[in-house]
């Protein structure tokens, strides 16, 4: 089953601007992860935030987690054309120990 | 870190034929491998969970007789799409699970014509 709901579904910005994507989930989690997927390609793990963390940074990425609202956000600062991709949040807690993916946000960064 | 090698990266096959996709763990023993499917412009959905030495667990709506999963060793899990149809055209990707970490294969783009 699909748990995460990302918004927006699509986001188009200019290079240099910041991009914010949001994700909501339904069940209790141990951690939440964000992945990137270039068109038709595999997944690239970006960042993992644990349920007891509220914010995490990695380079130009900033992730927040609000377990009371069951939501997370991914901020990409100073975006580049190379950031163009789809971004998915994923939570643990699938019935088989699998990840449950959100619907994704398709980010387009125009040079 | 852990590496999962997935082959082939893309395949085109005729309707009615079967296609085998392999996921090989290169530097660890994977007792569990997850198989996901991603239709165009959609997210990844779990199809089945393969367990070494036992039967796979299929998600609701996934035909076990059509999507055959074999996990005969700790380093190899295979997904065979039998009697493929155009509606099976999708992106298939595997993932292991070790200590709550997940490593994904590079995915297989299947096109059935």
Image (cartoon, rainbow, N blue to C red):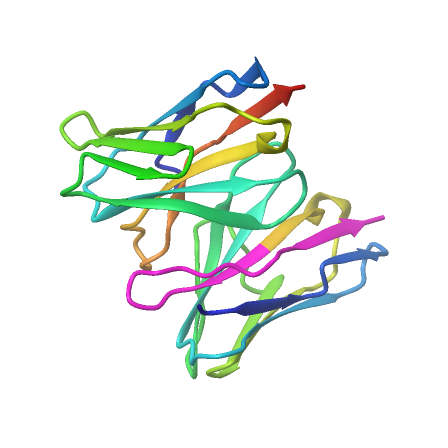
Q: In the shown orientation, is residue B35 left or right of residue A40?
A: left
Q: Which residue is found at the position 34% from the left and 68% from the top?
A: B98
Instruction: Indicate the position of residue B72 as horizontal and vertical percent values.
Output: 51, 84
Quarter of the rendering containing residue B2? bottom left
Q: Which residues are magenta?
A: B93-113
From what the image shows, is residue A69 above or below residue B78? above
Nearer to the camera, B61 or B7 = B7
Instruction: Indicate the position of residue A64 as horizontal and vertical percent values.
Output: 26, 31
Q: Which residue is found at the position 77% from the left and 45% from the top?
A: B86
Nearer to the camera, B30 or A19 = A19
From what the image shows, is residue A41 above or below residue A74? below
From what the image shows, is residue A16 above or below residue A67? above
Nearer to the camera, A97 or A105 = A105
Q: In the shown orientation, is residue B110 left or right of residue A74?
A: right
Q: Which residue is found at the position 18% from the left and 25% from the top?
A: A69
Instruction: Indicate the position of residue B30 as horizontal and vertical percent values.
Output: 42, 76
Q: Which residue is found at the position 56% from the left and 34% from the top?
A: B42
User: How many numbered marks does the figure carry?
Assistant: 0
Q: Quadrant of the N terminus of chain B?
A: bottom left
Q: Is residue B66 magenta?
A: no
Q: Is residue B108 magenta?
A: yes
Instruction: Indicate the position of residue B97 as horizontal and vertical percent values.
Output: 38, 65
Q: In the shown orientation, is residue A11 left or right of residue B31?
A: right
Quarter of the rendering containing residue A73? top left
């Amino acid at each position: 089953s699909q748990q995460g709901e990302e918004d927006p579904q699509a986001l188009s910005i200019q290079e240099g601007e910041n991009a914010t994507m949001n994700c909501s989930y339904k069940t209790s989690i141990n951690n939440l992860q964000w992945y990137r997927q270039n068109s038709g390609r595999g997944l690239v793990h970006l960042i993992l935030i644990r349920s007891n963390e509220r914010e995490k940074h990695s380079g130009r990425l900033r992730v927040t987690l609000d377990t009371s609202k069951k939501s997370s956000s991914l901020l990409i600062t100073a975006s580049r054309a190379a950031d163009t991709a789809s971004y998915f949040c994923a939570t643990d807690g699938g019935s088989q120990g699998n990840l449950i993916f959100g619907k994704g946000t398709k980010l387009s960064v125009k040079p | 870190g852990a590496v999962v090698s997935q082959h082939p990266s893309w395949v085109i096959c005729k309707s009615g034929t079967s296609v085998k996709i392999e996921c090989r763990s290169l530097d660890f023993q994977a007792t569990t491998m997850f198989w996901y499917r991603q239709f165009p412009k959609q997210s990844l959905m779990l199809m089945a969970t393969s367990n070494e030495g036992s039967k796979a667990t299929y998600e609701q709506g996934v035909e076990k007789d059509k999507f055959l999963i074999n996990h005969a060793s700790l380093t190899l899990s295979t997904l065979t799409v039998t009697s493929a149809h155009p509606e099976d055209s999708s992106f298939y990707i595997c993932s292991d699970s070790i200590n709550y970490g997940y490593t994904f294969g590079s995915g297989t783009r299947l096109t059935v014509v």
